[in-house]
Amino acid sequence: MKTLEITGYKRANLGKQEAKRLRRDANAPGVLYGGQEQIHFHTPMAMRKELVYTADAHFVHLHLGDKTYKCILQDIQFHPVSEMILHVDFLQIFEDKFVKMQIPTATIGKAPGVTKGGNLAIKLRKLPVWAYPKDMPERIQVDVSTLDLGQMARVRDITTQHYTILASPGIPVASIEIPRALRSAASKAEEE
C-alpha cells in the first residue's frame, strides 16, 4: 500500500471564523481521531490533491510538529458549488488494530466473453476491506479469465489473503455484457 507524506500545523484557535480564515489562505482545517486525543490541524490544500483526487487507497504519514502519525483519510467535506475542500478527518491507525478501508478493484485475465464480442463491465470500483494495516491490499484482484457472455464475477469469487471483504458475497463485481448487435444477431439466427 502506498504511503503519502502530509505536513500539517496544529491549530490553536478553533471555530468558524478561524476555519474561514484558513480557507481564505488556501489551507484546509482537519481533525485526527483515533488516538488518545483529537488533534486539530490545518494543511495547505495543494498537499492533499494526490490523496483526494485519486481512485487509489493510501496510508498517510501526517507530520504535525515533531510527531508523525500513521493514519487514513476517513472523511472529506467539499463546498457544494466551488468544490473547495472545507474539512478533512483522518483516523489514526495502529499495527495491532484492524482498520476498514475502501480498496479499488482491478480485473485480471482475458475473458472469453470479450473475445466473442462482449463488453467487460465493472460493477464495483471499490470494496470495503477489514484487515490489519500490514495486510491491507493495494488493489483487489478480480479474475475474469473464466467469464463467458452474460456471466459475472461476484464477491464470493474473489480470493482473499489475510483480509475480509465486507460486502455481500452475491454482489457482482464485474460482468460480461452482451451488446445489442450481438443479441439481435443471435435472435435472428434462432428464428431462421
Image (spheres, rainbow, N blue to C red):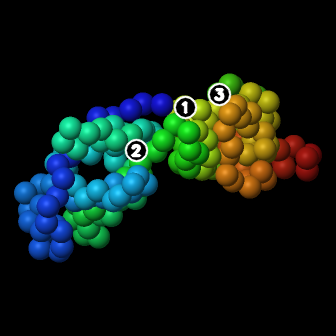
Residue 171 can be seen, yes or no: yes
Give the quarter of the image for residue 88: bottom left
Task: Name the foreground residue: 7 vs 83.
Answer: 7
Residue 71 circle label: 2
Give the quarter of the image for residue 109: top right
Mark 1 residue type: Lys
Is tag 1's residue or tag 3's residue first in the polypeptide sequence?
A: 3
Please, which residue is most extreme toward the bottom here? Answer: 16
Is tag 3's residue or tag 2's residue first in the polypeptide sequence?
A: 2
Answer with left or right where residue 144 lies relative to residue 25: right
Task: Identify the element where label 2 is drawn.
Answer: strand
Residue that appears at 30% across and 38% down: 68
Measuring from the top left, give residue 141's x and y in whole percent.
64, 32
- Answer few, some or many: residues within 10 Å of disc 2's Cα (few below 14, many 20 plus, some between 14 and 19): many
Please, which residue is most extreme toward the front here? Answer: 36
Measuring from the top left, give residue 170's x and y in whole percent.
79, 53
Reading the image, the residue beneath label 1 is 134
Residue that appears at 40% across and 44% down: 71
Residue 149 circle label: none
Task: Identify the element where label 1 is drawn.
Answer: helix
Mark 3 residue type: Ile
Measuring from the top left, give residue 2's x and y in whole percent.
42, 30
The answer to whether the residues at label 1 and label 2 have Cβ atoms under 8 Å apart is no
Q: CA distance from mark 3 to mark 2?
A: 30 Å
Measuring from the top left, give residue 64's x and y in whole percent.
22, 44
- Answer few, some or many: residues within 10 Å of disc 1's Cα (few below 14, many 20 plus, some between 14 and 19): few
Mark 2 residue type: Cys
Reading the image, the residue beneath label 3 is 108
